[in-house]
Amino acid sequence: MTKPFGNLQISEQKKWINKIPRKDLIVTKNSVVCASHFTDEQIIRTWTSGVGDKQVCINLKYPKLKEDAIPCIFPGPKYLSNPQTKRKSPRKRDSSLISSKNIKVVEAESKISEHPCNNDIDPEFSEESSVLSTEQKFEKICCDLESITLPDNWKYEIHRGKKPYIVLYTIQCNNNEAGISIEKQIFLDSDMILKCNIYEKNINLQDLYGNSNISSLDDLISIMIILSSKKICSGGPLVHEFEGISVECADIIFKNHWQHKKCPYLIDKSSIKNKCSFCKGLRRTFRIKKSRLSVGKSTRLLLSPTKKKLFDEHRNKKHIIQKQVLRAKHRIQYL
């Protein structure tokens, strides 16, 4: 792991040059410092997201340095490798003391010594990092994707063009003629808007995540984890099982299966069933329609025997209530 001097600010370059104990040091934009000159506390080797049981920890492919990291380990005498000091220069300390008019000099020095970490933060840098445009957020996610390992066999592709976008997907190996097919897809465009497809069928992310807009890689990783915890509904019967028969409540999906229009497509992996309740009832619907067509009956109303019995009971109750209402009206008129 190295970090070139060209990626540092001028103030940071001076700090690094002062710490390196070499008289013949010549620094260029391509000059780098090896990771062996930094402590383990200054190197970021893992990426974490979430809280509690939902926390995810991923080892970075390329470790990074913290923003305030300064080389402090060098061969030779011990005083060359002293990583403890984080003290300001005398000029900066004097300016901070003069600006505090109502505070004594001794009190100002005590406050600076109590909070050494706040002295090294550049306010301009903190403001820039807190407010980023959508394009900067998109580029940051592209850079972070190259340095981490995605969970559960997820893969990604970055497409550059007039409107760049990122595609994250999972692949399924089929035993039939289809071979390999893309199972789950996530599209993120440069406007930081997400779209999700299951077998080329668009699904609503608000039911899963609650929002289609994201702001960081953490949100993208959490969506991938949610989709990985779901399995896809296997659908209804095959198309060739009921050739020449179709129903209005179902469509043909990619795997030549009938899929109900109300199918949620995603089921929890903890459930034993591979089908949703809507797709499970499609086979019965096709059987009833096939039997009625073979006899020559009308297929406009498709009801099972149990549902037909309930329908008749409700219809009889409705007629009884209508009669009771008419009798009550006649009594009111007579009185």
Image (cartoon, helix red, strand yellow):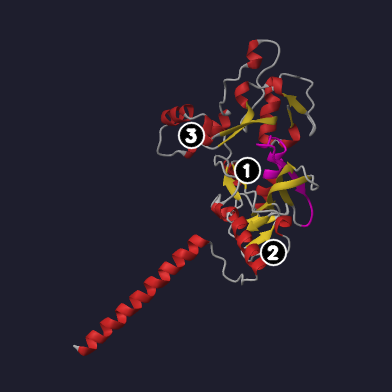
The residue pinned by badge 3 equals 97
Task: Name the residue: 60% across, 62% down.
Answer: 288
| Amino acid type, callout 1 | Met
Name the secondary structure under disc 1: helix
Name the secondary structure under disc 2: loop
The N terminus lies in quadrant: top right
Q: Earlier in the sequence, mark 3 or mark 1?
A: 3
Give the Cα separation between the discs numbered 3 and 2.
87 Å
Give the Cα separation between the discs numbered 3 and 1.
51 Å
Q: Earlier in the sequence, mark 3 or mark 2?
A: 3
Segment tinted magenta in the rendering: 141-162
Q: Is residue 260 above or below residue 274?
A: below
Q: In front: 1, or 32?
A: 1
> Is residue 318 visible to us here?
yes
Dot 2: few (<14), some (14–19), or many (≥20) neighbours within 10 Å?
few
Residue 274 falls in image quadrant: top right
The residue pinned by badge 1 equals 224
